């Protein structure tokens, strides 16, 4: 899909979520959708992506651009992009490790946590940096939760990043 997008789409795009995890640090990761966001954020980009999916016999529902809502809420997100694939007409980026985790924090489902833990391990092995202070600050900004499972996932992520539990 990355090669197809790079050759048939134009401009700059960002792959996030499970598809980014699979293409970047977790090749066994499967996902039900492909979160691919046009960096301009235009309706024309969304339509081009849907046309690409249809022409490739990929269900249109499997391409998702809704995550740009969360992306654009992260200060400095444009400075956190890493080239993943350059095609004939488009460049596909992935988020930095820090941006990937920041985007997962809002929901932090069990799958999101597994992605984050896999990324932390990958970064330790590869030397890619994570801005721990920024992630901890964002975790601290999140609303308190009475959901014990979510609180536990947040604590596991903190521990994996190296912050001692409270």
Image (cartoon, grey):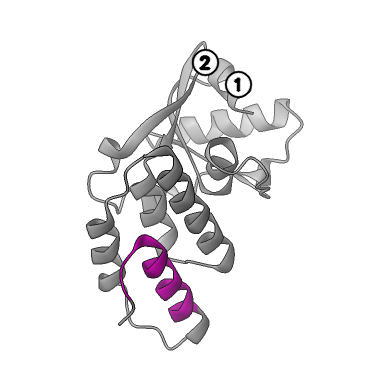
Q: Taking 61 as reference, is 89 above or below it?
A: above
Q: Which mark is residue 3?
A: 1
Q: Quadrant of the N terminus?
A: top right
Percent x, y of residue 94 = 44, 36
Is label 1 in a helix, a strand or a loop?
helix
Answer few, some or many: residues within 10 Å of disc 2's Cα (few below 14, many 20 plus, some between 14 and 19). Answer: some
Q: Residue furthest front?
A: 125
Measured in 3D between alpha carbons, the distance from the residue under mark 1 to the one under mark 2, in whole angstroms, is 6 Å
Q: Residue at x 68, y 44 (%)?
A: 28
Percent x, y of residue 142 = 31, 73
Question: Is residue 121 covered in magenta?
Answer: no
Percent x, y of residue 66 = 49, 50
Is label 2 in a helix, a strand or a loop?
loop
Q: Residue at x 73, y 36 (%)?
A: 58
Q: Taking 91 as reference, is 88 above or below it?
A: above
The residue where tag 2 is placed is 87
Q: Residue furthest right?
A: 57
Give the residues drawn in magenta, as a range: 150-164
Q: Is residue 148 left or right of residue 5?
A: left
Q: Residue furthest bottom?
A: 146
Of 132 and 4, nearer the camera is 132
Residue 64 visible in image: no
For marks 1 and 2 on the same chain, the one whose residue lies earlier in the sequence: 1
Q: Is residue 23 left or right of residue 140?
A: right
Question: Is residue 161 covered in magenta?
Answer: yes
Q: Is residue 72 left or right of residue 15?
A: left
Marks 1 & 2, CB-CB < 8 Å contact: yes
Of 106 and 26, nearer the camera is 26
């Amino acid at each position: 899909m990355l090669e197809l997008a790079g050759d048939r789409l134009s401009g700059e795009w960002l792959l996030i979520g499970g598809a980014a995890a699979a293409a970047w640090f977790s090749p066994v990761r499967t996902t039900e959708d492909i979160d691919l966001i046009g960096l301009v954020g235009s309706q024309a980009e969304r339509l081009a992506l849907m046309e690409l999916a249809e022409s490739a016999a990929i269900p249109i529902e499997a391409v998702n651009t809704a995550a740009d809502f969360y992306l654009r809420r992260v200060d400095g997100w444009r400075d956190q992009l890493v080239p993943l694939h350059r095609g004939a007409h488009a460049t596909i980026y992935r988020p930095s490790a820090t941006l990937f985790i920041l985007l997962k924090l809002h929901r932090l489902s069990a799958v999101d946590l597994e992605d984050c833990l896999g990324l932390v391990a990958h970064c330790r092995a590869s030397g890619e940096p994570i801005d721990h202070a920024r992630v901890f600050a964002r975790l601290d900004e999140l609303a308190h939760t009475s959901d014990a499972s979510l609180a536990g996932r947040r604590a596991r992520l903190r521990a994996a990043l190296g912050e001692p539990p409270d």
